[in-house]
Image (cartoon, rainbow, N blue to C red):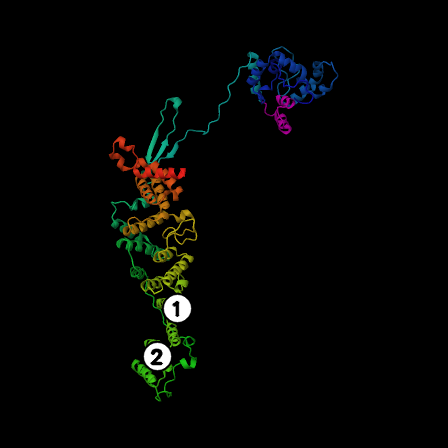
Amino acid sequence: SRQGYEDSHWQYPPPGYRDGYPYQSHQWQPVAWQDDRDLRQGESYGKSYRDQHYYRGYHPNLATGPPGQDRTQTYSSSEESHTSTSRREGTGEGTLSSDSGEVSGQPKEPNLLLQYHDSGLSSSSHELSQYIRDGADSCDPVLLESWNVRQTEGPSVSTPTPAAPLKFPQLHTALCFGAGGHLVLACPHHPAEGQRARVELHSLEAILQGTEELEELQAFPGPLAREDLHKVDVMTFCQQKITACDLSTPRGRDSSLLWKLLVLLCRQNGSMVGSDAAELLLQDCRRQDRYRRQEPVASLAGLADDEWAPRAPGMLDLITGEVPPVVETQAQIVEKFTKLLYYGRKKEALVWAMRNQLWGHALFLSSKMDARTYSWVLTGFTSTLATNDPLQTLFQLMSGRIPQAALCCGDATWGDWRPHLAVMLSNKVGDMELNHRAIVTMGDTLASKGAVEAAHFCYLMADIPFGYFGAKADRMALLGSSHRQAFSQFARTEVIQRMEIFEYCQQLRQPESFLLPFQVYKLLYAVRLAEHGLPAQALQYCEHICTALLRRDPAAHPALARQLLTLAERLKLSDPLLLEMSEQDQEVEPDWLEQLRACCRQWEVR
């Protein structure tokens, strides 16, 4: 109850006062609801409301009047101001006649929003003020006239509650994708008019026919683990990919090299030696670079400039006592080398041999002397080679050092990286760990410069294992694709196909082998097949993935096992073998699916 009220409960006006109020139909409370409440409360309830609260709620000054004062008379004295104000605001057509036959001077019933305010039905004074101020503007004379006609004809009848609004403004087609490679359409219809519902089934393979994505999926002879596949089909697919590569760009040449490597592995049943890869690398070279030889550096040979420089023609040789000819032939050079040794001048003989490019004589002679002299002659020999000469790579590797090519390859000024890798693969040094680190270093250098395919070729030669997409420290996740980029670019369809061919080449050598990190991408590939209307091939992929997981503990990869089970259960009816079975046999699930479900349940219980 509100302060100043005599009763503790809310009161409502009787039907007599409500029937004569023209503004009633535009308020928050429906007419039918008030009629029902009035009928339930009875006439005595409405009289109590009129005597105790009605006029006091509308005219607060009556609440403080003297006891015994006639409220009806007091209300009549203030009605004129209220009636004139209502007419100025355009809230009605004046006072209307009521069922009781009162004259136009009869007091009007107040607005319901004011009743709510006085009865405590609303706690927001600001909201009430907005409705009270705008109440006159929303009055519709047509509605008022129609309301008065109903009221004068007889008692009001309860109007039905408005129905909920429609979710969609018009009929439309409902669409969903089925797991069997179909697009399901529920066409719009009017059941009230006798129209029958129509459902259309469309093949996604037929709808997507001619798209690049579907053609790429259809061209691949997967899954490659099936028994009826011949490796010639795989090699043919690789040759088509080689033809499509753009050899004018470095990335296209590197991608072509990976496909050629897969052809080589497939032809040789997954086996390969270093010389095979070297031959492949040299075939892929655009040209054989001619490395310009340099003059030996004096500082590296340990000689002064005047010692290293050839003597001027016509000057007397103090050692032999002869005048050397202007132009010396190869025989004369060797003869002088021999004469120097006659006199025991080994150092002068080495200098003469190194100055005249007799590196064989110099290296053999120094090897029979002390280690420091041999290193001195060897350094002088390597200083004559070009920096990017593959011989430099070989000699540095044989000297027990990481070749400079492994740290500088990939630059345009350095040249092609393939000859350097070829010379390291074909000439294994005694320290296999050094050879392994040199190849891995070359791969890291190429990867840092964006040559992902070239880097992965080096990693394959070094037997680097495949990792996972989330492990950024791993060097490879999918063959020929960087796992440091976005997943949509990383797990492209072509990349997954290339990786599956590499796994197939390994299975040619070891039939029971498989790449465990790759199984999740095969599941992704199966989902793409199902989305493009190829559910039978997708189910075959599910079977091969399940076979690989069952060889290990499926509980080690619970998320992959659950996703595989969900997809397989949706695709199990797409098996072509079901067409040849009876209805009873079709209800029996394949063994691999039952085993996978059992493993998933055991993992959940555990």
Q: Which mark is residue 387?
A: 1
In the rendered structure, which disc, 1 or 2, sits on the residue that comes first in sequence? 2
The kind of secondary structure the magenta stretch mainly shows is helix
How many residues crowd mark 1 within 10 Å: few (<14), some (14–19), many (20+)? some
Is 11 one of the magenta-colored residues? Answer: no
Residue that sits furthest to the top in the current view: 101
Q: Are marks 1 and 2 in contact (CB under 8 Å)?
A: no
Crowdedness near tag 2: few (<14), some (14–19) or many (≥20) residues, C-alpha within 10 Å: many
User: Is there any visible trace of residue 460 in the rendered image?
Assistant: yes
Tell me: residue 482, above or below residue 541.
below
Among the 4 quarters of the image, the one containing residue 533: top left
474 or 321, nearer to the observer:
474
Measuring from the top left, give residue 139's x and y in whole percent. Answer: 59, 23
Calculate the distance from the C-alpha at mark 1 to the C-alpha at mark 2: 22 Å
Q: Mark 2 = which residue?
A: 353
Q: Position of residue 260 (x, y in %)?
A: 30, 55
In this orientation, which residue lies closer to the viewer: 181 or 577?
Answer: 577
Question: The N terminus lies in which quarter of the figure?
Answer: top right
Residue that appears at 71% across and 19% down: 63
Residue 586: x, y in percent?
Answer: 28, 33
Q: Secondary structure at mark 2?
A: helix
Residue 90, image x and y in percent? Answer: 63, 22
Q: Which residues are magenta?
A: 112-139
Q: Is residue 41 left or right of residue 309?
A: right
- At label 2, which amino acid type do we have? Ala
Residue extending furthest right?
66
Q: Secondary structure at mark 1?
A: loop
Q: Residue furthest front?
A: 606
When asked about the image quadrant of residue 572, the answer is top left
Q: Is residue 326 visible?
A: no
